Image: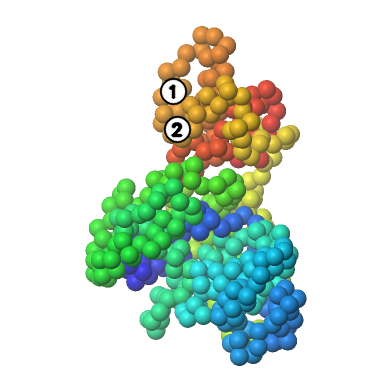
Amino acid sequence: MINALIERWRSETHRFHFPVGECAVTLEDVAIILGLPTNDLPVTGPTMSSFEALEAECLHQFGVAPRKTDCRGSFIKLTWFRGLRDCIVLNDVVHIQMYVKCHIMLLFGTVLFGDKSSSVVHWKFLPLLRNFGQIIQFSWGSACLSHLYRSLCRATRVDCKEMNGPLTLLLTWAWIRLPFLAPIPGNPRVFPIANRWRNWDRKNYAYRYNSLAHYRRLLDDLQEGQAYGIGNIDPDVIPLDIHHNSVIWSATVPFISFECIEWHASDRVRRQFGLTQGVSNQERDLGASHGEVLTGPKNQDWANTHSCWVMQWTNRLETGYGSFKITPRNIGHALGINATGKLFPQKVVYKKLSEDDKIIFRRFQGKTLKSLTDEMMDIGIGNEEECLMFKRIFILYIQMAFLLPTTINKILPVHLAPIFEMDGISERNWGAMF
């Protein structure tokens, strides 16, 4: 199946080209498939080829350092991290954090940024783990996508015989976006979504024997309505801290991971976000940044080398269309809504709601845009209570249709917060929500 997808990948556009249009692995996909943060600091910094620097970093974080035989240049063998992790006694916070850091490095070397051997990991990631509380503040999701795009581009070369990179992400993406390719999924309530297919080969033994010709035929016969199947994911499964990053999932931005720069051309796959696809923009030329590799001594600070790309990522909330920048203030002026003042709560705590509000919460939870439309058309406004309910339905409708549209066409907890803040609702910061 992976070979059939590689044949459909175009390195010029960073997209899969199917009979029904273009499709890609996006920030939304990596967030819900692997549960990674996507709207945070870029994964970048210096790389040094010095073994002494590697040794000093490991001593600082773990109290021990690998021998030269435990390394391969600037890469540390995963067996060293496994051995260290298994020896740590979890008797205090410091040792628990060391254990977690070892496990993170193992994930980096296998699931997220693995090479073809999946036996080593570059030590460049270690400085980003120094501050344990700040680890989650990096955009690991976009960094993972940069490695996937880079791996797909390399795999299209005629002299490439194997593909590396986050293959778990690619496989799971194909199974949710193109569900006719998938083996029978497991528990639909599991998150991250990749865990749906844990040990899938044991339950679907015959699936592994499908041929390349079989997958080519399925993709050649792809019809409208068969792709973009992510809407079958129950919105309640996705944690709020993941869904709050949805504000940048459709942003057209660079992906950054040290030397690796790739382009998130979301403007070419608008249908994946439930939007209308217009005429695609010209492909973005990444120049020399697209070919950077860490071979040989590379002692440089990539945050400075790629400062222009870092700046574009930093301004990701200001999606550019010509010279116009989309900001809360511009949104407020354009739509005639308030763009200052107090923000809405990020989530609704069900247990803290009154009994009446709990009934309202259950009434709207999981409803679709169509059901809201039908209810809004049917409801009367003969008394104050009906008027208040109409306002609540209309607020939910506006959010789902215009302010916070998602590919999951159901009411989410983030949509429900405003309807419990009806007093002074017009004075809230609607522009920032957009």
Residue 142: which disc? none
Mark 1 highlights which residue? 375
In front: mark 1 or mark 2? Answer: 2
What element does badge 2 sit on?
loop
What element does badge 1 sit on?
helix
Give how far across and how far down residue 247 sits, in percent: 58, 47
Relative to 77, 217 lies left or right: left
User: Which residue is at 56% across, 61% downward?
Assistant: 141
Extreme residue in the bottom direction? 69
Location of residue 389 by image quarter: top right
Q: Residues within 10 Å of mark 1 (few under 14, many from 20)?
A: some
Give how far across and how far down residue 400 sits, in percent: 51, 36
Q: Is residue 207 above or below residue 160?
A: above
Give how far across and how far down residue 411 sits, in percent: 49, 36
Label 1, label 2: how many angstroms apart (C-alpha)?
10 Å
Mark 2 highlights which residue? 367
Q: Residues within 10 Å of mark 2 (few under 14, many from 20)?
A: some
User: Which residue is at 43% across, 20% downward?
Assistant: 377
Give how far across and how far down residue 383 sits, in percent: 54, 9
Extreme residue in the top direction? 382
User: Which residue is at 62% across, 54% downward?
Assistant: 39
Identity, as a three-letter code, of the amino acid under mark 2: Lys
The N terminus sits in image quarter: bottom left
Q: Earlier in the sequence, mark 1 or mark 2?
A: 2
Relative to 245, 156 lies left or right: left
User: Which residue is at 62% across, 60% downward?
Assistant: 139
Relative to 20, 236 lies left or right: right
Task: Using the rendered image of the protein, determine whether residue 292 is visible from the camera's viewpoint.
Answer: no
Mark 1 and mark 2 in contact? Answer it, CB < 8 Å. Answer: yes
Q: Is residue 194 above or below residue 275?
A: below
